[in-house]
Image (cartoon, coloured by chain):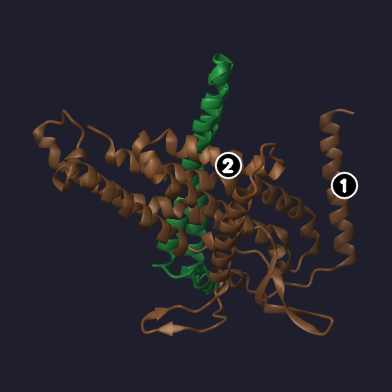
Chain colours: A brown, B green
């Protein structure tokens, strides 16, 4: 059978399935009750307000604590039972550690800086990786909808990631931003560091203009580094939410699910396999590039 | 920037101006995908070209490829996020 025939047959099958589903489950009209944005709403579980600061314990805090605990536990567990003949888990963790050490921090900073900042960069990498990964595991965190199990009211299973909330990537980014400026000032002195922003050999007339552009670009780094991580994860979760049932419930059209559910599965796999790891890698790599550039000798 | 929940809540207001704004957001975010689309295609095309020329450089090229891919791909989301900001502010 030719590939084209197969593809046409598969598409025809989907259309037939959609028609059957449409006949069995008639359209219910638009659903006004379901609020998809509540998936990302942070309900305070334990209200805790300290003056102007809202320190309530909510879903994002739970995911943050989970990611921290998982990162530390996994790394300590592997480190305490290192073996000469590694099993599969140890091999995988060793490969990730090697990636963080040699590819991410080793190749972007000189050896002294790399030795000093590898713990920070490696921690960022593993923390973001775990934080993204547990974002795709359904956990009983949806306190809006509940289901009963043996007479026990439990929150529904939902997916959410700490990094799909702007505050957490922004906090990480600010840490990185201040760290690399501090390293730069330490390496070249304050005036020397600012002078280092202007490329050598610039005509004197152009220097102020270039300096202003460079200052702007330093601040844009805060936005780009945090929004890159936040928006990637948020867009992935939105896609999974709408394709995996959100659209069907909103429009009350069961037949649509025949087309969107396979798409949801594809996006889910794509997010887990590529985006979750890649965003952690990118964040850590850019951190070490910034750190390396701030301390590099001469521009 | 308010959290995404309250942002989407405002998005459901039903006046003509809001409708036009949603269309603009959709069109803007859609147009914003064109550039990164070309960019991602260009990156992978160049990677294929370089690997066929120098297969022994494959490892190095692959690691740079993912860096370039992620940097380019993120631009879609900048368009989307700035669209959202223009929409709500």
B41 or A101, which is in the foreground? A101
Q: Label 1, secondary structure: give it.
A: helix
Q: Considering only vertical position in the picture, is A299 above or below A45?
A: above
Q: Earlier in the sequence, mark 1 or mark 2?
A: 1
Residue B44 visible in the current orientation:
yes
* Chain for numbered disc 1: A
Name the residue: 56% across, 51% down.
Answer: A129
Res B35 seen here: no
Residue A13 shows which numbered tag? 1
Asked whether A145 or A49 is in front, the reply is A49
Q: Would you place residue A98 above or below residue A152 in this image?
A: above
Quadrant position of the C terminus of chain A in the picture: top left
Q: Name the image quarter holding residue A258.
A: bottom right
Crowding around mark 1 (Cα neighbors within 10 Å: few <14, some 14 to 19, many 20+) is few
**Residue that appears at 56% across and 26% down:** B59
Other-residue count near label 2 (Cα within 10 Å), few / some / many at <14 / 14–19 / ≥20: some
Left or right: residue A54 compared with residue A18: left
The residue nearer to you, when weighing A239 against A55, is A55
Q: Which residue is mark 2?
A: A96
For the residue labelled by badge 2, is the local secondary structure a helix, a strand or a loop? helix
Q: Position of residue A13 (x, y in %)?
A: 87, 47
On the rendered image, what quadrant is the N terminus of chain A found in? top right
Residues marked 1 and 2 touching at CB (< 8 Å): no
Please provide percent x and percent y for residue A89: 69, 45
Instruction: Find residue A58 and report its image quarter.
Output: bottom right
* Residue at the far top in the pictured view: B53
Q: Residue at x 46, y 46 (%)?
A: A284
Q: Chain of mark 2?
A: A
Question: Is disc 2 on the same chain as disc 1?
Answer: yes
- Which residue occupies the extreme left position in the image? A204
């Amino acid at each position: 059978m030719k590939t084209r025939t197969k593809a046409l047959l598969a598409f025809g099958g989907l259309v037939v399935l959609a028609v059957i589903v449409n006949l069995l489950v008639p359209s219910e009209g638009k659903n006004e009750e379901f609020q998809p944005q509540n998936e990302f709403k942070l309900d305070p579980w334990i209200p805790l307000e300290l003056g102007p600061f809202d320190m309530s314990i909510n879903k994002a805090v739970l995911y943050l604590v989970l990611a921290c605990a998982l990162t530390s536990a996994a790394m300590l567990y592997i480190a305490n039972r290192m073996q000469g003949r590694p099993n599969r888990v140890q091999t995988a963790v060793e490969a990730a550690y090697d990636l963080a050490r040699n590819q991410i921090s080793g190749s972007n900073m000189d050896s002294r800086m790399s030795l000093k900042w590898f713990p920070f960069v490696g921690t960022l990498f593993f923390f973001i990786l775990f934080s993204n990964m547990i974002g795709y595991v359904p956990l009983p965190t949806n306190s809006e909808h509940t289901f009963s199990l043996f007479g026990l009211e439990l929150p529904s299973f939902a997916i959410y990631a700490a990094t799909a909330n702007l505050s957490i990537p922004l906090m990480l980014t600010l840490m990185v931003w201040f760290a690399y400026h501090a390293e730069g000032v330490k390496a070249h002195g304050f005036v020397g560091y600012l002078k280092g922003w202007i490329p050598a050999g610039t005509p004197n007339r152009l220097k102020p203009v270039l300096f202003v552009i460079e200052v702007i670009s330093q601040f844009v780094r805060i936005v780009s580094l945090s929004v890159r991580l936040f928006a990637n994860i948020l867009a992935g979760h939105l896609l999974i939410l709408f394709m995996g049932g959100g659209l069907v419930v909103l429009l009350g059209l069961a037949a649509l699910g025949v087309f969107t559910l396979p798409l949801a599965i594809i996006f889910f796999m794509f997010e887990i396999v590529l985006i979750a790891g890649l965003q952690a890698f990118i964040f850590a790599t850019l951190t070490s590039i910034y750190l390396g550039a701030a301390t590099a000798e001469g521009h | 920037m308010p959290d995404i929940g309250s942002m989407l809540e405002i998005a459901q207001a039903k006046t003509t101006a809001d409708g036009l704004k949603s269309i603009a957001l959709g069109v803007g975010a859609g147009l914003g995908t064109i550039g990164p689309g070309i960019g991602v295609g260009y990156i992978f095309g160049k990677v294929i070209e370089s690997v066929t020329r120098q297969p022994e450089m494959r490892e190095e090229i692959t690691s740079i490829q993912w860096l370039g891919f992620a940097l380019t791909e993120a631009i879609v989301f900048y368009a989307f996020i700035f669209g959202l900001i223009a929409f709500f502010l």
